[in-house]
Image: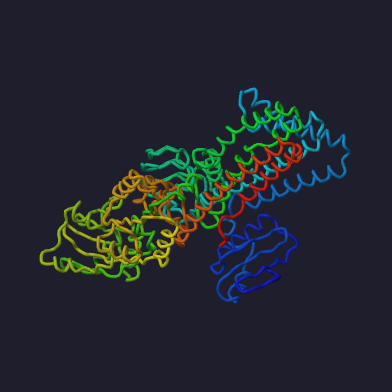
Amino acid sequence: MKFIIKHEAQGRMRIQLAQPRMSLEQADLLELYLRGLPQVTRTAVHERTRCAIVEYQGPREDIIPALSRFSYQTEGLKEHLPSHSTREINRAYEEKLTGMIALKAAGALFFPAPLRAAYTIWKALPYLLRGAKCLLRGQLYVDVLDGLSIGISLLRKDFATASSVRFLLGLGELLEEWTHKKSVSDLAQCMSLNIDRVWLKTPQGDVLTPLSQIQTGDRICVRLGGMIPLDGVIAEGEVMVNQASLTGESVPVPKGAGMTVYAGTVVEEGECVLQVAGQSGSSRYDKIVAMIEQSEFLKSTAESRAANLADRLVPYTLTGSMLTWLLTGNVTRALSVLMVDFSCALKLAMPLAVLSAMREASGFHITVKGGKYLEAVAQADTVVFDKTGTLTHACPVVEAVIPFGGQNEADMLRVAACLEEHFPHSMANAVVQAARERGLSHEEMHSEVEYLVAHGIASRISSKRVVIGSAHFVFEDEGCVIPEGEQVRYDTLPEHYSHLYLAIGGVLSAVICISDPLRAEAGQVIRSLRSLGIRRIVMLTGDSERTAAAIAAQVGVDEYRAEVLPEDKASFVETERAKGHTVIMIGDGINDSPALSKANIGIAISDGAAIAREIADITIAADSLYELVSLRMAAEKLMKRIRSNYRFVIGFNSGLIALGALGVIPPATSAALHNLSTLAISLRSMTNLLEAK
């Protein structure tokens, strides 16, 4: 790529591409490339000026070559380009807004009065019809006030006032529609599938293949906990599929051979071979958009309250207008009251504030699936953390393999890796990686493996039952024993490691010591959450008491529970809610899913299990827990803004009504001030709550 550096400062530069023009797709490709560079912390591409603003870390000498390497034909870049571009939405609405304002200005300057009057009547008809329909249905909604305001102005031949009211109403509707569509688009992009590769069935075996290369009719394998990447028909196997994201069903449904499954749903039990019915495209995106737009139950209480209050206030505005006319006999004063209503601002500003907050959250790598969850985050007083993958990085490493019963260390690691490779999770990956690093091959030596969620794995080798998993699973569920004479050695296992127990033939054969590095920011995040009003922070983990105590002491939680099962986590959350607490549950694994669904707000880590992300109400980036602090701050500031909006709308419009009734301001001024205040508060509601990152 050839470019010119137009401006430069420490860690920031503005470049202009050496090309005559830039299409929307090219702008999206460049932005996608820049965001993928490890040096770049923030970027924005402006297609009209062919400029890109790049904020970066590290030396300037590193970023310049990286920028120069860009090409619109960069391999694999288009495959990750979103099927729906927010940039296209912005361009379309920018043109609509510009056209509306230009037409208004041109009409005022160049159209003769009769033509302006005819145009005003023509554009007013939709408002008059909507108001009439409401009256015919016996409803007194804001459409009635809009229709009456414009209609009475037309009857009085006050075309300037009617035109101004109609223009401001149209402008507000356009801005609301723009913000809504952009917010929905941003959310849908965040919630769209982030699956790059799938296991393709071939005559030579399963091959890890880029999703973009999968064709209709191909057969792919989807295992337990995996997200179904494409619409298709099950060719082999039986599974339980969680379809909540598309159908709202809370209970997983059984799917067998010949049955259809849909992209974005999650396999909760079993595994299957799927015959693809359609290539990767926009179907999943469109389904998500429809889900967001139709999910009225996801509205916050504040939004619903605003909408209900707005409709309830309409009769009072009409009554006030009639009383003013009866008491004063002055139609102008009555019309001044009628020109003002609380409904417009209440119905417009509150949803805009919530949608804008959700859009802003996506900029902080936070996906919120509904406004009510932001409201709940602001009210929360209890936060429950899962440990592995949440407070820790979920990138554990094997520190030691301690054999028992005279077993060989290398042989035990080989057996463990052979079992664990079938059901990859963070600790399993650590075992497989350790075997790979030590050059230990582990060809299949066992029969079919059985995976028990949050417990472990069982199989048979040479007719002996082999199990690997937690102490609870190995010793209590499976009844395995410690070799005679090795109890002391077992009791002195290193306490600061997590332990994975391997037993063969009912006897402990090895303990694999695994360390899972704590997130550097975990302690500070917990302190920050306390400063933001969270009164109680709890850690739940399936690890041993010793490991849990060590981690809890390091991060500073108020209390912890060790060796808990998925049902124990869910039960704990339910108990806290029964006590009257508003609970946030944060997790990343399959075993966290029950607790996530039981909490007031379930928050999943973005690179965690697919089922956790589907069940969760909010998803945060895996990079940093500071997103939780940003989320809490945004939620609190949103509720503060909503309360502020209420006070302003009620106070300002009450003042306008009083001034209109007293004859201080005429109808045109009353309408202009009312609509301008509605527009102003709506624009304010669209501004960011937090400082940009």
Quadrant of res 309: top right
**Place of residue 257 in the rendered image (x, y in percent of width and height, measured from the top left):** 39, 39
The answer to which of 335 and 518 lies nearer the viewer is 335
**Place of residue 641 in the rendered image (x, y in percent of width and height, measured from the top left):** 56, 50
**Place of residue 471 in the rendered image (x, y in percent of width and height, measured from the top left):** 22, 58
Taking the image as shown, residue 567 lies to the left or right of residue 390, namely: left
Quadrant of res 460: bottom left
The answer to which of 167 and 492 lies nearer the viewer is 167
Quadrant including the N terminus? bottom right
The structure residue drawn at horizontal position 14% and vertical position 65%, both measured from the top left corner, is 487
The answer to which of 1 and 293 lies nearer the viewer is 293
Judged from this view, the residue extending furthest toward the left is: 485
For the rendered model, the colour scheme is rainbow
The structure residue drawn at horizontal position 71% and vertical position 43%, both measured from the top left corner, is 673
Residue 3 visible, this orientation: yes
The structure residue drawn at horizontal position 58% and vertical position 61%, both measured from the top left corner, is 75
The structure residue drawn at horizontal position 87% and vertical position 34%, both measured from the top left corner, is 114
